[in-house]
Amino acid sequence: MKKTLSTIAVTAFVVLSTAAFSFAEYTSTGISHFPFFQLGCLIVGGLLIISLKSKFTRLYTSEAVGAFALYTVMISLFTTPVIDAVKSLVS
């Protein structure tokens, strides 16, 4: 039961993080420049972390959530608004 609850918690975090990423990108770029590739990578990474959490019992919930949070930050760094902000900061 504990394993199922921790997997559900990780799944909820993955879904909410992916939804927050999608909302932020949609509001900043619109549908014409929406990063569908990054969203797909985020979904595949979330599914991979959820499957690892359900398969390995010694993987803590906080480790899985932290890994996905860092992965979300890494994916969001390679989107158009962030790259444009870095270009304007450097120039």
Image: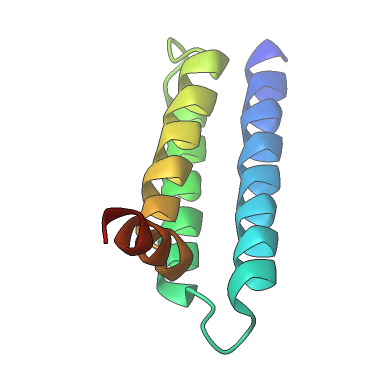
The image shows residue 59, relative to residue 67, as above or below, that is: above
Q: Residue at x 37, y 45 (%)?
A: 74
Please state which of residues 16 and 75 is positioned toward the viewer in this rendering: 75
Q: Residue furthest bottom?
A: 32
Q: Residue furthest front?
A: 91
The image shows residue 11, relative to residue 34, as above or below, that is: above
The image shows residue 62, relative to residue 11, as above or below, that is: above
Q: Residue at x 49, y 48 (%)?
A: 47
- Quadrant assignment for the C terminus: bottom left
What percent of the width, then of the height, locates residue 49?
Answer: 45, 37
Q: Is residue 67 left or right of residue 10?
A: left
The image shows residue 65, relative to residue 38, as above or below, that is: above
Q: Is residue 21 left or right of residue 59?
A: right
Please state which of residues 68 and 57 is positioned toward the viewer in this rendering: 68
What percent of the width, then of the height, locates residue 35?
Answer: 47, 73
Q: Is residue 17 left or right of residue 73?
A: right
Give the colouring mode of the picture: rainbow
What percent of the width, then of the height, locates residue 29?
Answer: 58, 75
Q: Quadrant of residue 17?
A: top right
Q: How many marks?
A: 0
Q: Residue furthest left?
A: 91
- Quadrant assignment for the N terminus: top right
Q: Residue at x 36, y 62 (%)?
A: 88
What percent of the width, then of the height, locates residue 63?
Answer: 46, 17
Q: Quadrant of residue 16?
A: top right
